């Protein structure tokens, strides 16, 4: 899902695609996992279209957080999609801006309101594998193909994951 959303987003941003193509042409695929720009593009895609767009937890005991109380058995929903687009945390929250993830030196930075794999003891056990797999894909894909928008932004189908209904792009071999 994340890669489908990412290709759809990148297809409408030729500047982002050009940078990915340069990275693919000038670096080794083994270095893609540590490439700050590739990671920034993936993070920005997951921010706008998180595969895990929400999660739920059950209070095992009576609990409180700030002014709120949660009796034992209360189901608490974390809505990552909303958090990842909240103007208190993200400037131009609805805009695809991979450079927001890079500091002044071009290094990847952490963002405090970003939870694409959850957090804490329930953090997705496959998060590092998933990120590596996506980095390798981005490097390989943009080293071989160019994409252009077909003018269609996929509709979101929220079930267990947030998946696109379909991704329509024009794709050309390099």
Image: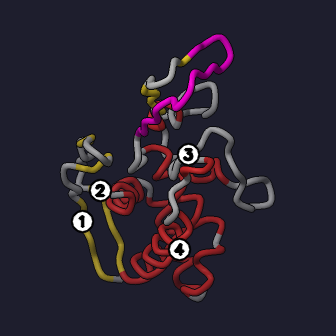
The quadrant holding residue 169 is: bottom left
Residue 158: image location, x then y, percent: 27, 40
Upstream in sequence: badge 3 or badge 4: 3
Upstream in sequence: badge 2 or badge 4: 4
- Spatial CA span between label 3 and label 4: 17 Å
Image: magenta residue range: 54-69
164 or 67: which is nearer to us? 67
Of tags 1 and 4, the one toward the viewer is 4
Q: On the image, numbered disc 1 is attached to which residue?
A: 170
| Quarter the N terminus occupies | bottom left
| Quarter the C terminus occupies | bottom left
Residue shown at the point (60%, 22%) measured from the top left: 63
Helix, strand, or loop for circle 1? Answer: strand
Q: Which mark is residue 115?
A: 3
Residue 45: image location, x then y, percent: 46, 52
Q: Which mark is residue 132?
A: 4
For the residues labelled 3 and 4, say whether their Cβ atoms are less than 8 Å apart.
Answer: no
Upstream in sequence: badge 3 or badge 2: 3
Of tags 2 and 4, the one toward the viewer is 4
Helix, strand, or loop for circle 4? Answer: helix
- Spatial CA span between label 3 and label 1: 31 Å
For the residues labelled 1 and 2, say whether their Cβ atoms are less than 8 Å apart.
Answer: yes
Q: Look at the image and name its color scheme.
A: secondary structure
Q: On the image, numbered disc 2 is attached to which residue?
A: 149
- Spatial CA span between label 1 and label 4: 26 Å
Of tags 3 and 2, the one toward the viewer is 3
């Amino acid at each position: 899902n994340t890669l489908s959303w990412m290709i759809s987003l990148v297809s409408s941003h030729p500047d982002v695609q050009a940078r990915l193509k340069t990275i693919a042409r000038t670096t080794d695929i083994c270095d893609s996992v540590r490439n700050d720009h590739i990671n920034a593009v993936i993070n920005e895609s997951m921010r706008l279209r998180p595969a895990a767009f929400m999660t739920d937890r059950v209070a095992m005991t009576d609990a409180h957080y700030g002014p709120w109380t949660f009796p034992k058995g209360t189901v608490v929903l974390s809505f990552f999609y909303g958090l990842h687009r909240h103007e208190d945390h993200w400037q131009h929250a609805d805009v695809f801006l991979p450079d927001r993830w890079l500091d002044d030196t071009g290094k990847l930075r952490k963002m405090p309101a970003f939870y694409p794999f959850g957090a804490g003891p329930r953090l997705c056990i496959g998060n590092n594998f998933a990120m590596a797999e996506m980095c390798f894909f981005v490097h390989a894909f943009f080293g071989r193909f160019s994409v252009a928008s077909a003018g269609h932004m996929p509709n979101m189908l929220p079930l267990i994951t947030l998946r696109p209904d379909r991704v329509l792009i024009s794709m050309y071999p390099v």
